[in-house]
Image: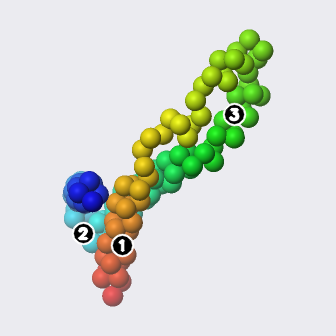
Amino acid sequence: MKKITVLFLVSQFIIFILSYLSNDGITLLTYINNSFYVGGFLLFTGGIVYIFRTGSFDFFTSSMRKVMSTKNTRDAFDSMRSPSEVFSMSPKVLFLTGIPIYIVMFVAMAIYYS
């Protein structure tokens, strides 16, 4: 829980820095836009990690290795690890950080449009 809180606070700091560096300065609209980018990046990265970790991509990579390999290199390709074995990171941290950023963004949007 501490890692998620620290990552959330760092993300909020990054959002405010990006808002400050934009041409409009720190406004509610630039905060909404930048939080969409940062939260979307975290959720997209978490989704990619989830796809690799669950083994959904293993069949594709093994098929491509078989198609692209020659007879001489087939043993080398067979000894390679699958992508689900390579990714040890859990996507839970990325999801549990990206979702609150989106919730705060939706609250800011409700304030902006009311």
Which residue is painted at 34% across and 60% down in the image?
Answer: 97
Secondary structure state at the residue bearing disc 3: helix
Secondary structure state at the residue bearing disc 2: loop
Which residue type does callout 1 highlight?
Ile
Q: Is residue 82 above or below residue 94?
A: above
> Which quadrant would the N terminus be assigned to in this image?
bottom left
Q: Residues within 10 Å of mark 1 (few under 14, many from 20)?
A: few
Residue 52, image x and y in percent? Answer: 55, 45
Q: Nearer the viewer, residue 79 or 56?
A: 79
Residue 104, image x and y in percent? Answer: 31, 72
Please give the residue where the numbered disc 1 appears in the rendered image. 103
Please give the residue where the numbered disc 2 appears in the rendered image. 27
91 sits to left or right of 110:
right
Which residue is painted at 42% across and 49% down in the image?
Answer: 90
109 sits to left or right of 3:
right
| Label located before the other in sequence (3 or 1) | 3
Which residue type does callout 3 highlight?
Ser
Q: Residues within 10 Å of mark 2 (few under 14, many from 20)?
A: few
Residue 27, image x and y in percent? Answer: 24, 69
81 sits to left or right of 114:
right
Where residue 19 sits, quadrant-wise, is bottom left
* C-alpha separation, residue under disc 2 versus residue under disc 1: 18 Å
